[in-house]
Image: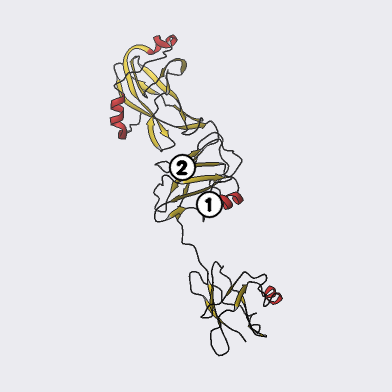
Amino acid sequence: MKKFTNYTMIIAGLLTVVVLATCKKTASDKVFGGTARIRGVVFYKNITTNNPDTATTAQLTLEKGNDQSTDFTLSLTNGAFDIPLLVDGDYTFNITYYHTIPGSSKSILYQLKTPFFHLNDAQFKDRDTLLLLPTVTASPTLQLTVTDNTNAVVNNAQVYLFSDISTLNKYRRTGAGSVKSGITNQYGMVVFDNLQPTISYYAASYIIRVADTLSNHTTDNKAPVISALSSTVLNTARITIIPDLPAVAFSLQVVLTDQYGAYIPGANVCIYSDKALLAKNRNTCAGSISGSVTGTQGAVNFTGLQSLFYYISAYKVVGKDTLTNKATDQTPTIVLQPNAANTTTVILK
């Protein structure tokens, strides 16, 4: 059998214990009475770490030849087995092990039936290491790994699993409406069970750090993290979270002057994205996106805008006259640039 040399020290400690239990006496005369011996350790691939762990309570059945009635079964207590007094012949191991998913009452079944191997009289086959892989899940189960943009796993990341995009878009940071939620372990993994095989799932993940926040918010709604979920075997998927980019800020400064270039304080300035709406509500600011009053330098600043061009309506009542930019208010501004000083000057007459 294949050796897992990384676990030599673990195996050496475990093999100090000899485990013999639940022997099927009906086959003992065909299996025992010889001088051969085999011992080893059973491991399983832990889905929450992706590393081999000891299958402490595995059931190991030793079968001789093709006669499945000629066998005996061990109920292991520490993953180790040591079977002496075997007769010359061909053998195979049939092993089962159940692993309970952390945070769940559900289990994953691990099974392994080895190829036949031969034991000669007086042969001592030592440190035979067996690794079990996930076989059957009790319910549709997803093992999700979260990594950053350097491909390093991210522990303590919040993960929400959604079954529809609209709910994800609305609640990706709060988890409201998610079907499952969890925190990644030290290996960047989180396991969700009791899922539906006919549903596509979307995963939203983030972690808040001192200097920044990592998330997958730019891609979480682009494609499901898993679709056509298998109902019997372990499903695996991986998502990447990256530093959130600074919020894109679009702003506009409007400066009002008269026809001689003097600043006009105390004037009303309103911005529109629809020039027809401006024309309908000129000198009232009704229906505008935003409105404000110029300061002593004739300026007003608008923030929280989009990357669009806008129409500006400005006016000031002076005695019985009203100064306006009616002659130019149907001319759009330039398209606003992100994180830039977008400035325009408007002349009132």
Element at label 1:
loop
From the top left corner, tell me how far across and down residue 340 is, in percent. Answer: 48, 72
Residue at (29, 20) in percent of width and height: 124
> Dot 2: few (<14), some (14–19), or many (≥20) neighbours within 10 Å?
some
The amino acid type of the residue labelled 2 equals Ile
Quadrant that contains the C terminus: bottom right
Residue to which mark 2 is pinned: 183
Residue to which mark 1 is pinned: 220
Residue at (71, 75) in percent of width and height: 280
> Dot 1: few (<14), some (14–19), or many (≥20) neighbours within 10 Å?
many
User: Which residue lies most toward the right here?
Assistant: 280
User: Is residue 62 shown above or below 260?
Assistant: above
206 vs 200, nearest the viewer: 206
Q: Is residue 56 visible?
A: yes
User: Which residue lies most toward the bottom here?
Assistant: 260
User: Which residue lies most toward the front here?
Assistant: 319
Using the rendered view, name the quadrant where residue 321 is placed: bottom right
Q: Earlier in the sequence, mark 2 or mark 1?
A: 2
